[in-house]
Amino acid sequence: MNLLNSAGFDPQALLDRVHGDLTLLRELVDLFATEVPGMLAGIEEAIQQGSPSELEKASHKIKGSLLQFSAHTAANIALQLEKNGQAGSMAESGMLLKGLKKEIYVLHQTLRAMLQNGCTR
């Protein structure tokens, strides 16, 4: 799957957000790669503990990060998890987390390829 050609990712919006500065984008991607495992672990822990309030908080945090990368599909999954937490429901949260992890993996690979190739589309 190539997010550069996906409706779920807008590389031009991302480049606009960093004013075309690939060095800044590289730094943000590196920071995201460092931070995302902890964010995902927070969601996973909330699901395992059956804590809707923690699910809401952890999902909201990762959603914001994903939106900064114009990763709309992944952000929408995080939003679904956040709404589950708000509603006090843990239903399907495990399945949503699995989908979120997959989307984040693809996003990370796509961002790395984008930076490596200097590609915008």
Image (spheres, rainbow, N blue to C red):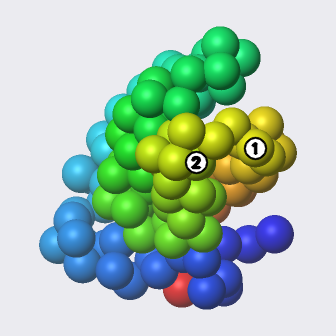
- Closer to the N terminus: mark 1 or mark 2? 2
User: Label 1 sits on what residue type?
Assistant: Ala
Q: Mark on residue 91?
A: 1
**CA gap, disc 1 and disc 2:** 7 Å
Q: Whole-percent x and y of residue 52?
A: 53, 31
Question: In this image, 99 relative to 31: left or right?
Answer: right
User: Label 2 sits on what residue type?
Assistant: Asn
Q: Residue at x 51, y 71 (%)?
A: 72
Corner quadrant of residue 58: top left
Q: Nearer the viewer, residue 99 or 3?
A: 99
Question: Is the residue 120 above or below the residue 34 in the image?
Answer: below
Mark 2 is surrounded, within 10 Å at the Cα level, by few (under 14), some (14 to 19) or many (20 or more) other residues, namely many
- Image quarter (top left, top right, bottom left or bottom right) of the N terminus: bottom right
Q: Mark on residue 84?
A: 2
Q: Is residue 26 visible?
A: no
Question: Is the residue 120 above or below the residue 109 in the image?
Answer: below
Q: Is residue 100 visible?
A: yes
Mark 1 is surrounded, within 10 Å at the Cα level, by few (under 14), some (14 to 19) or many (20 or more) other residues, namely few
Q: Whole-percent x and y of residue 90?
A: 69, 37
Question: Is the residue 84 above or below the residue 43 in the image?
Answer: below
Q: Are marks 1 and 2 in contact (CB under 8 Å)?
A: yes
Q: Residue at x 46, y 25 (%)?
A: 54
Q: Whole-percent x and y of residue 24?
A: 24, 51
Helix, strand or loop at disc 1? loop
- Image quarter (top left, top right, bottom left or bottom right) of the C terminus: bottom right
Q: Residue furthest front?
A: 88
Q: Whole-percent x and y of residue 65?
A: 37, 48
Q: Residue at x 45, y 38 (%)?
A: 56
Question: In this image, 69 relative to 36: left or right?
Answer: left
